[in-house]
Image (cartoon, coloured by chain):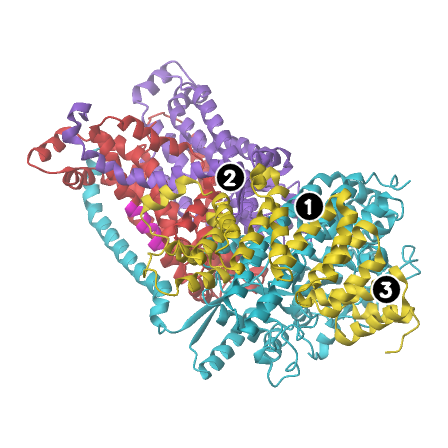
Chain colours: A cyan, B purple, C yellow, D red
Amino acid sequence: MSDRNRDEVYSAGRFQKLGLWLAVLFYVLSVVMVIRNCGGMSVVFSPDTRVITIAHWQLEDGFREGIDAAIAEYEKRKAGQGVKVKVRQVAIPVRGYPQWFLTQLIGGNPADILEVTGSSDILNQYFTPLSPYIGSPNPWNKGTPLEKMSWRESFADDMLSALDTAYSEFFSVCTFMHTTRLYVNMKLYEEATGKTELPDTLTDWLDACRKLKEYGVKQNRPIIPIGVRGFDKGTIGQIFGTYYSELCTDLSDTGSRYGYGTQPGELFRQINAGELSEDRLLEPVEVVTEVGQYFADGFPAIDLEQTKYLFFAGNVAFFIDGTWNAFSMINNAPFPVRVIQIPMLDREHRLGAKAFGRITELGSGIQGRFGIPKKTRDFELALDFLQFLTSWEINQLVMVEHCKWMSSLKEVKYEGVMKEFEPVTNTSHTAVSSPFTSIGSLTNRLSLQRLENSIIRQPEDPKAFFWNDFLHDREQTLDEIQEATYGVQRNLWSMDGTRSALAVGVILSESDSSEIGLFLQRSNINLEGIVSRYRAVDANILLMEELGKLKEYGKNGN
Amino acid sequence: MAIEVPFRKLRYYWPAYLLIALPLLLVLVFSYHPIVNGMWHMFYRWDGDTVEEFVGFQNIVRMWRDSSLLHSFFVVTIFVVANIVKMALPIIVAVVLHHVISDRMGYLYRILFVIPMIIPGMVGILIWKYFYEPNSGILNNLLRMMGFISPTETIQWLSDELLVIPSLVFMGFPWVGAFGVLIYLAGLQGISEDVYEAAEIDGAGPLTVFFKIELPLIMTQVRINLILMIIGTIQSWENIYLFLGADGGPGGIATVPGLLIFREAFARGLFGYGCAIGFVIFVVTLVLTLINNRFVRVRK
Amino acid sequence: MVNPLWFLAVTLAGVGVVGAGESGANRNTPREALKAYAAMDYTLAGKLAAEIPDTPEGQLISGLCDLYDRSRQNIRRGQSTLAGIFVSESMPLDYRLEAGIALGRTAQLMKERRELYGDAGDRYDHVKIFERVMKMAPGSSAARNAFLYLIRERLETPELQEAAFEELEIFIRDFSGDSKLLPPVHLLAEYEYIRLKNDYRNAVRHLREGYETGFANPSENRSGLFRLAFLYHKKIGDKPMAVKYYREYLERYPYSGQAAVAQRFLEELGEGGK
Amino acid sequence: MARVVRSRTVEFFKHVFILLVLFFAFVPMYLMINISLKDNQQFARNPWFPEAPFHWENYLFSWDHLGGTIFNTAFVAITATVLTLAVAIVGAFFFARYKMPGSKFLFGVFIILMMYPSVANMVPMFKLITSLGLYNTHFALIIPAIAGGQAFNIFVLRNFIEDIPQDLFDAIEIDGGNMFYQIWHVVIPLSMPIIGTLGILSIIGQWNNFVSPLLYLRDTNLQTISVALLHLEGEYTKNWGQLMAGYTIASIPLVVLFIFCMKLFIRGLSSGAVKG
């Protein structure tokens, strides 16, 4: 180094010494803060405080504040009972949640109450079965209309949405309910159509959309007749499900040899045998493709943030979305907004000749499933808080007052705008699930993507396009079913482990009859579960066989 | 110059092995054990917790059939090629910087070039995510100001299957990592004065000076950066995860192998399959590094 | 089987994962071991069982843990321990029954997944074990389980099918144990009659008997009731029974999603009135 | 500097070119700071240029979101760096000072790891961390970082220590100084610059580390800055001002670190720390 640099180094030496000391100081400070931040927490709270954590991915405004209010109330009441309790709330963005959820379950010490996601295998492996606890009434419902009902019956759908069909077991309870509605920008609607009463049938709706498009051309404004939030494919799935049920609800009578409802394997068997035309399953695709021509282009990419931007910009007439951010959209919109249901497929419409009209929404749309992992350190407290959260008074405090969502419980009255969100119950036709979206999560995602492509490309025969593309991805669907079958077979071994544990439980409790009764009931549940496992395995084998035999569009059955 | 210790002197010098004991232990437990464990679990259906079923070559057959894996290597090749092209700019900047006459300005520039490096990586990526944000992002605002698109129109840079990969390539535009520029600059400083004078006498123009003298000299640094870049690009999946989430953009088009491991293992729970993909990445990196060492010979 | 390097890593790294063992074998360890196993806490149960290797409880629990504790599974050793317990006269009957069922069932499952277990499943003949269990304690829940696993396998093999259906009827008719144990068998019977013989009459008979005795799983009870009414209505065409059970369904589950369907079917059958 | 005489215009073009590249490199940083002082209305109206009412409360809001994570990250980064370098120096000294039987093989063991893509063992590493009970603790980040850093640091330090004249070591050894005495009194003082540079690189590496905290830390109060920023960005109702304020806060510690070791860092890089 030249001389000039050398003395520079020494003069810099003092400056760097200062830097070094500053770094050491900062390090010591951060060590103190880290200790205070995590280790110190237990020191700060007296050791006999029981701490549990609740985690979820609902970042909508109002949800976190609602849970905080419930926590404050819970800590106060438990202090009244002489129990020191601290509940921590963790909210993770939906994009990172599936991975965050799975790694902590495998990692070792998961949060005590978790919003559940993922496959049945994961739920069965990591979450406590709740069936022994749902029979007795929820202790927090004393003095409310649900007092006499068992915890299970206190839910609007008797906990059917929380039932895991693969293991016929309850691993979670539902905390809120959503329905899908249309938010209508009344100012734009009236300007374009000149009418004030809103469409109730599909024909009127499409007619209004056509007028809106013409209005947009006339005004040289980028009018989007129907705005859809595509990024998590939820809304597309909802619309397809609604029209599929309105067209195919009668299939439930014949769609399964074992009882009411439809099984994909049986439907495909009927198609191969010529007893059923695949057209019946594909007409809803044509309806959604026709509705889809009024969507914004690039709709699959629109996420929640852009939804609000587009809607408030005033260029979207009908916005289809769940009722989770309905209230904030209605209040913050710079124009009057009304809410209507998804218009019904009417008989005048060319595809509506055989439609069955509106479908009951009773028991559908109940979500927000929270479960308790087996590895939790304080199961008793976690269960108590979960029952607190799903008690009549508190659930309304969180959901209805704070989030303006609907509660998942019975006997809940709504007023004002929220009345529009209540589920439709004045019809006797039940929803039915389509084979394209009910075989597995991968097949469902591929089908919804296929639906989006059909909307974007507007093929002259959407049914042929959808069907042939469905067969094109047959390999991946078969792979998913095979994986599910392995999961079921592997699970037979762990279910036998449960049987054995219950048997040893019976041996242990020799005389104590009440305990024996519970063990016998649970071993019966276990054996009934094994029978339903046989059903699932046989259904999968039949489905793979029949799916393999399906032929190109129009060539089946003859 | 170091002390030669043949076998017979071991009796006296054996404590020296204590020096290497701790680093060796750490490397064995935290690097070599996972490598072996990964290769072992390639042949298992493993959910990372209790389920470990030997399934032989099922994972490998599944990989062969899995179109998203083949696609992910195709996508990562695009990124590698793009990064090779992007290496040109730092070299040019280093050469130009080298020829800047005033010493003080040169030193000031060097400092300025390092500053972008000290922003945390995460901040840089999130700012670029804002750059592409359809409604209020910089790019669309710019295009609206310049009239290329109408005031309310939005171009979906990260959600359109055609645009997402070019956007990811373009990200971090000047691509001038301080690491690259300063390393090349150090190489250039090695050239002595008389070499330039000799070139001056033969009447060599700036371009021939560059290609004949400067480029060959910094080839060693370029080669090192090339290898590090290739390994880095094949491994890196963080920006794609941050930009597009675990699905890897519309239709999973931008899924790179690293992101595929992350998704298959940590979101879907297929740990055995994740190990299998990891092994494939290791093999591909090894092959590329060997090729690189042999063909990018440094002409001394 | 956990890969050996993992053990090397843990021991080398010196970070103790498994808690240190504490007090010696005190008086009621056998009971503690059973309790831990019943709560499916395999690590604790395995540790306690290891402390009392010569007692019946110790052997039973260690054998069962070898089979079901997936993190340290040793099927071969587990099955041989349980086989020892099953055949030895000196063991208490309850332990022998449980050992027999666990041994037979795991052997059966291993035979079904040959690509995974190879022929390790053939070491024990589960049919003989199940039949012996049924003879040892007719009417017990162990006998019922053994029968259910056996009959399902027989129904799967076409040539044994006819005989299997008769055996099923005989088993249910002269089952000496508590009738509350039978609903799962009825459920299987209903399912197999439809699947293999399309015989809805017998299927409905079994479903009805199972439902009247009461399924343990609340959701099985609910869907069973609706299925019963539906099969009477759509598959057999027995109107009065269909109406009876549709009404019972509306009465017990007025809020359910399928209540509206029951109402519609009632109107279809001309019995609209509640 | 090469004294290639050129006309003023070419000199001018060189400066313009470099300034242009610097301009594009600095635009994101400028926008970050500029937007961090705006609320949503100002931002929507004009995101480009600073505007009168500066909203400093954005920083307060972001601080109580990110404050704790800054300290977590600092703790992890500094601890990991100090321990990595300590272990690496000892290792490098072994390779530089002694040619023991098998030291060539051992050196190979370390160097091969430089070529191994860490993403390939993401899955088994996770399993190892959880089975060692390190899950959801800061050590799940520190210990693997120490192990991961050995290969590169030993490789660089060995080159450096080999250049130190051996007689300095022999002198100490004669009057009874053991190996660690030699390291403390000869190796560390003499290779301060390279240790400084490697330290800075390691701290920057740990500060930007995003995958390990994402996988191994569950609680938000333990979380490091990168993942905290991701979660802040993942919120639905976006307030760009607060978001950019959060990004600025996350950058400050590194800027301060850099101000103090700028000369050291540039000299380290320019002296070709990474020899061919």
Please name the residue that numbered disc 1 is placed on. A481
- Judged left or right of residue B185, residue B126 is right
Looking at the picture, do discs 2 and 3 lie on one chain?
A: no
Please name the residue that numbered disc 3 is placed on. C232
Where is residue A332 shown, x and y percent of the image? 65, 70
- Judged left or right of residue D223, residue C225 is right
Looking at the picture, do discs 1 and 3 lie on one chain?
A: no
Q: Which residues are magenta?
A: D74-83
**Mark 3: amino acid:** Tyr
Q: Which residue, as the protein is rendered here, is positioned at the far top? A: B202
Label 3 sits on a secondary structure element that is helix
Label 2 sits on a secondary structure element that is helix
Name the front one of labels 1 and 2. Answer: 1
**Mark 1: amino acid:** Ile
Relative depth, front residue between A151 and B145: A151
Label 1 sits on a secondary structure element that is helix
Residue B168 visible from this viewpoint: yes
Please name the residue that numbered disc 2 is placed on. B275
Where is residue D170 shown, x and y percent of the image? 11, 31
Tell which subunit mark 3 falls on: C
**Placement of B81 over or under A452, stated as above or below:** above
Image quarter where the N terminus of chain A lies is top left
Relative depth, front residue between B98 and D249: D249
Relative depth, front residue between C74 and A236: C74
Tell which subunit mark 2 falls on: B
Distance CA(mark 1)–CA(mark 2)? 23 Å
- At label 3, counting other C-alpha atoms closer than 10 Å, the crowd grade (few under 14, some 14-19, many 20 or more) is many
Q: Which residue, as the protein is rendered here, is positioned at the far bottom? A: A143
